[in-house]
Structure formats: structure tokens, C-alpha cells
Amino acid sequence: MVIYIVMDSAGGLVKYTDKGEQLEERSLQHSPEHSVPINGVHSVHFVLIHGGSHGAWCWYKVATRLKSEGHNVTTIELAASGINPKQVQEIMSISEYYEPLMTFLASLPPKEKVILVGHSVGGLSTSVAMEKFPEKISVAVFVTAYVRDA
């Protein structure tokens, strides 16, 4: 499911599904079969995907806040970004760029689901991941991000 977050005229945030249905406020807590216990409490696993000209480092404030709330957070370093050793000249296709995300998702345990958060060009990676690993993604969030049009 894709969720759109829109600011209303009063400055509040309203959430809509991709079908235009307004969502009610819900907790980020998932059912135990889709979450990972941390200190005996089930938490959500967020996977944060950076945008163009960034690296995983750009999520440090968000990741710190989510972790302080007890959530599991993984920040992905896409190819030729941040500390990823691949050089930009070595990337011959967009699929090589988002390969670190695909490798990570493939390594998740079979019943674990994550919330993907993609920013900017990281939205392309998020879109592909949703198609390739639908059973491992509970929600995808696009933060001013591109969405692949298949």
C-alpha cells in the first residue's frame, strides 16, 4: 500500500491511500508475526533509503529518534554513495545502483516485514523493492521521492 501524507488547510497532516481513502491515525506497532522483539517488546523495522547525492548518513536524526522509540532501523548505503566502495564510473545501470537494497531485503528472515522509507531518487529503489519483495514490505513511504512507472 502506498500512503500519501498531505497538509490540510489548518496545517494538520492527513494520510490517504493510493485509492484516495483517508486513513485514521494508527500506531506504528505491527502484529507480533511481522515485527522483531527488542527487549521483549515488538518493534517496527524501518529501512531508510537515501536520495541522490546523499548517503545513509543523511538519516542520522531520523534513525536516532526511531531507535530511541525502540524501533529497529537500517540505513542503506546505495552503490557509489556515502561509504559504499563502488565508484560512480563502475555503475552501468540503475539496477546496480540499488543492488545493496535488494541484497539486504533478500537477507531478511522469511517472516520479517519492514517499512521502507525512500527519499528522492531512493524512491526508485523503493518501487523496485516493492515489486521484487512484496512479502517483506508492510508499508512503503515516499518522501518527496520518485516512483517507478512500470
Image: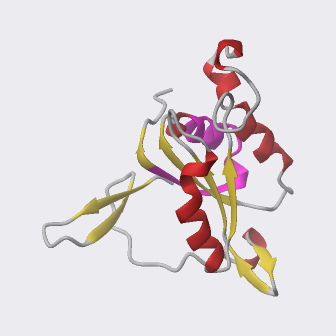
131 up-or-down from 56: above or below: above
| Residue at the image point whose x is 68% and y is 46% from the top | 76
* Range of residues picked out in magenta: 125-142
Q: Is residue 7 left or right of residue 43?
A: left
Q: Is residue 27 left or right of residue 42?
A: left
In the rendered view, tell whether residue 114 sits above or below residue 129. Answer: below
Q: Please, what is the dominant secondary structure of the magenta stretch?
A: helix
Residue 2: image location, x then y, percent = 47, 52
Depicted 24 relative to depicted 135: above or below: below
Task: Determine whether, in the image, residue 46 is placed left or right of residue 144.
Answer: right
Residue closest to the eye, 88 or 93: 88
Question: Would residue 90 be counted in the magenta stretch?
Answer: no
Residue 84 in the image, given as x and y percentages of width and height: 73, 34
Q: Quadrant of residue 13?
A: bottom left
Residue depicted at 82% across the width and 43% down the height = 106
- Magenta residue check for 137: yes
Question: Which residue is found at the position 81% from the left and 85% from the top?
Answer: 39
The relative height of residue 100 versus residue 8 in the rendered view (above or below) is above
Task: Report x, y in % for residue 101.
Answer: 71, 40
Q: Position of residue 115 (x, y in %)?
A: 61, 59
